[in-house]
Image: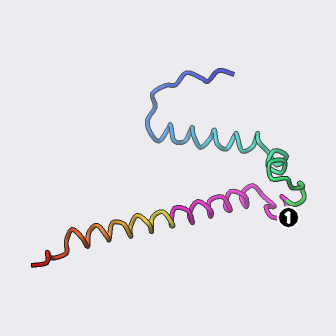
Amino acid sequence: MRAARRRRLEPEVRRQEVIEAAEKLLTVNGVEDIVHEAGAAKGTFYLYFPTWDDLLEAIRGRLVVAFGEVRERVLAAMRRILRRTLAPEAE
């Protein structure tokens, strides 16, 4: 299958197209694909995630945690750099 020719769009329009494509693929790659990949039963999937929104919320939660961890490491590195840069020089 050949990808459609790209066209120049306003950033928000392009963003919305990307979101729509992601939603479409999440629908196409349904529960069967997910449980197959996880080696779990369909019932197990629905036990943990009764709705797609529950699954998406869990994914969002993991991303938020990962972002927070990276953010803390970056801030710690910036603090170290600032301390070295702004510390009075020893005489």
> Outermost residue toward the left?
91
Which quarter of the picture shows residue 63?
bottom right
Apparent side of residue 34 relative to residue 80 in the rendered image (left or right): right
How is colour applied across the structure in the image? rainbow
- Pinpoint residue 3: horizontal percent, then vertical percent: 61, 24
Q: What element carries label 1?
A: helix
Q: Is residue 54 magenta?
A: yes
Q: In this view of the protein, which residue sits in the foreground, 48 or 51?
A: 48
Rendered residue at 76%/39% (across/down): 28
- Pinpoint residue 67: horizontal percent, then vertical percent: 51, 61
Residue designated by label 1? 47
**71 to 26, vertically: above or below:** below
State the extent of the magenta-drawn residues as a range.
Answer: 45-68
Quadrant assignment for the N terminus: top right
Apparent side of residue 85 relative to residue 18 in the rendered image (left or right): left
**54 to 8, vertically: above or below:** below
Apparent side of residue 56 relative to residue 63 in the rendered image (left or right): right
- Pinpoint residue 70: horizontal percent, then vertical percent: 48, 63
The chief SS type of the magenta part is: helix
